[in-house]
Image (cartoon, rainbow, N blue to C red):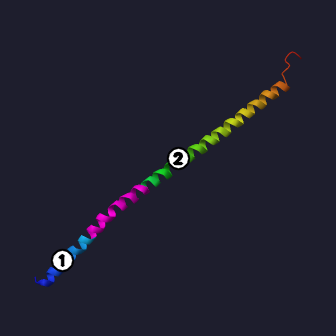
Amino acid sequence: MGPDYQVHYDNRFAGTKRLQEYWDADFPVQVGSGVFIYFLIVLAYFLFVSLSNLQKKNAKEARLESLVKETELKMLRSQINPHFSSTV
């Protein structure tokens, strides 16, 4: 347990001190990056949901427009070809 042991012991903690200094200096950057990535993921999710809802809305609107046109066409046909129930 001479000086060799003491040098090895000091080197082990010197690396830990450097690691702690790096961690202390880099921690705000890591947190900021994590928060930024989290918000990107949340934004991508909400964009996906919004696009999905918009697609459903457009499909429903197209279906309703076709029903309106079909109803108008039926109404015009009934005006052109009225039923004559009095002629037998």
Q: Residue at x 38, y 58 (%)?
A: 32
Dominant secondary structure, magenta: helix
Residue 57 image point, x, y percent: 60, 40
How would you rate the neighbour count of disc 2 (Cα within 10 Å): few for under 14, some for 14-19, many for 20 or more?
Answer: few
Report which quarter residue 59 is drawn in.
top right
Query: In the image, which disc is placed on residue 51?
Result: none
Where's the C terminus, which quadrant? top right
**In the image, residue 83 lies at what x, y percent?**
84, 21
Q: The magenta stretch spans which residues?
A: 19-37
Q: Residue furthest right?
A: 87
Q: Amino acid at mark 1?
A: Asp
Q: Which mark is residue 10?
A: 1
Query: Which badge, 2 or 1, is on the more N-terminal residue?
Result: 1
Q: At 27% from the left edge and 70% from the top edge, which residue is drawn? A: 19
For mark 2, what is the residue?
A: 49
Numbered disc total: 2
Kindly state the secondary structure of the residue where label 1 is placed. Answer: helix
Q: Dot 1 surroundings within 10 Å: few (below 14), some, or many (20 or more)?
A: few
The correct choice, above or below, for 79 with respect to 52 in the image is above
